[in-house]
Amino acid sequence: MKSRLTRRRNMSIVLCSVALCAAAVVFDAANSADRIFAGDPHVYRARVAEMMQNGLPYIDVPFEHLPVMLVPMLIPWFLGGAESPGIYTSVFGVLMTICIGGSTVLIQRIGESLGDRAAGWRWLLLSAPLLPLVLFRNDPVAVVLALLAVLAITDGRPGWWIPAFLGGLAKIWPSAVASLGWKRQLGRSAAAAAGGVAGLALSFAPSFASARNAVGLHTETIVGAIVGLVRAARDGSAEVLVTTAAYLNVPGWVVAVNTLLGLGVVGLALLAMSRQRSAREGVVALGAVVIGVIMTSNLFSLQYVLWVLPFLAFDRRKVVLLAGLALSLLTGWLAWVWSVKTVQHLDFYVLVSVRNLVLLLVAWLCVSPARLPSGVDELPAVYRAG
């Protein structure tokens, strides 16, 4: 009876996630003409076409994605996308819908392992405002890999480092899952972190950097938003440079300050994780580590907020749910208003700054003391033993 109820619960939560994704696709179709929601698959297809014609990524062709992301970019190409941009975009959207549905099941499974049956529903609520944006980005792939690693840890499986390693070669941040086990499983944690280190090193390769074409600080970073706010208030324009994203040309020391702030958040989050009292507290605190990793970069694309939301779903406090929902809604609103013109204006930077303050609040809530009643006080034996 219990297994039947679990299957029904999982089926209903998957159906709800697919329904939300379908609604997001309809929304995108109605608003794609003048919005940024569904534009990335066309860029992905162009990159694949260039590889098919000229040779290997990084070597023969400048390429701004990490190796694992070749998989979701190539699948639509071989399933009809080579002949039609529309087919490529449709197949890519289906793949990301599968990833969102899979993430929902994984979060529900992790939640049940941690004594929480509502985690999947919280995730759906938190992620819904971002679905029109993320269904046509490759970020759900990295979320799935990170959650596979977390589930393996909570289930006591020693191979948890494998999806974390692959995640590091997809978007760098999933290797942060290594922070859940470094005190108990140093070898596996080092292997998991190696994926992120390799991904980070590859991001500095000349062919990667030239394709990314980053200049200074992205407009939506913590420090970048402040710079844009000051410039727009003082001069009436933020003087944004649009390459592959919207950047503010700033001195190197400003970029360094932005990175140091992120490293500070990572350090504080890791300190909090070292004092965890339960497995669930560690998983929630991992959200703050991910926020710190995001903050270290000079690029903070809107869809990066999706990376944080799964970890908030394991916190039962209403204040965390409301803060996470505010973060998601504000980011969705930024996606709605974004344009080459709006990124020059003061009101855009006011909105970004408010969103960033909420992001910092969420990071603090993830590591704040006495934050949640523990559903599981002991970690699995394989996680404890090392």
Image (spheres, rainbow, N blue to C red):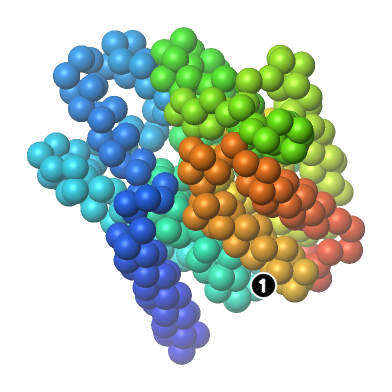
Q: Quadrant of residue 284?
A: bottom right
338 or 49: nearer the viewer? 338
Q: Which residue ends up furthest to the left in the rendered image?
A: 83
Q: Give the residue type that dot 1 points to.
A: Gly
Which residue in the structure is indicated by mark 1? 115
Would residue 151 be seen by someone viewing this image from the given angle? no
So how many labels did they put on this image?
1
Q: Is 59 situated above or below 319? A: above
Would residue 76 be seen by someone viewing this image from the given angle? yes
Q: Is 323 situated above or below 215? A: below
Place of residue 273 in the rendered image (x, y in percent of width and height, measured from the top left): 80, 47
Q: Is 269 situated above or below 223? A: below
Quarter of the C terminus within the rendering: top right
202 or 339: nearer the viewer? 339
234 or 327: nearer the viewer? 234
Side of 170 relative to 117 (left or right)? left
Residue at 32%, 62% in the rendered image: 30
Place of residue 129 in the rendered image (x, y in percent of width and height, measured from the top left): 52, 63
Q: Within 10 angstroms of label 1, few (less than 14), some, or many (20 or more) residues?
A: some
Q: Is 107 situated above or below 159? A: below
Tell me the element at label 1. loop
Residue at 62%, 51% in the rendered image: 308
Place of residue 320 in the rendered image (x, y in percent of width and height, measured from the top left): 74, 65
Q: Which residue ends up furthest to the bottom in the rendered image?
A: 1
Residue at 46%, 35% in the rendered image: 170
Q: Which residue ends up furthest to the front in the rendered image?
A: 236
Place of residue 289 in the rendered image (x, y in percent of width and height, measured from the top left): 71, 42
Residue at 69%, 68% in the rendered image: 321
203 or 24: nearer the viewer? 24
Q: Quadrant of residue 97?
A: bottom left
Q: Quadrant of residue 248?
A: top right
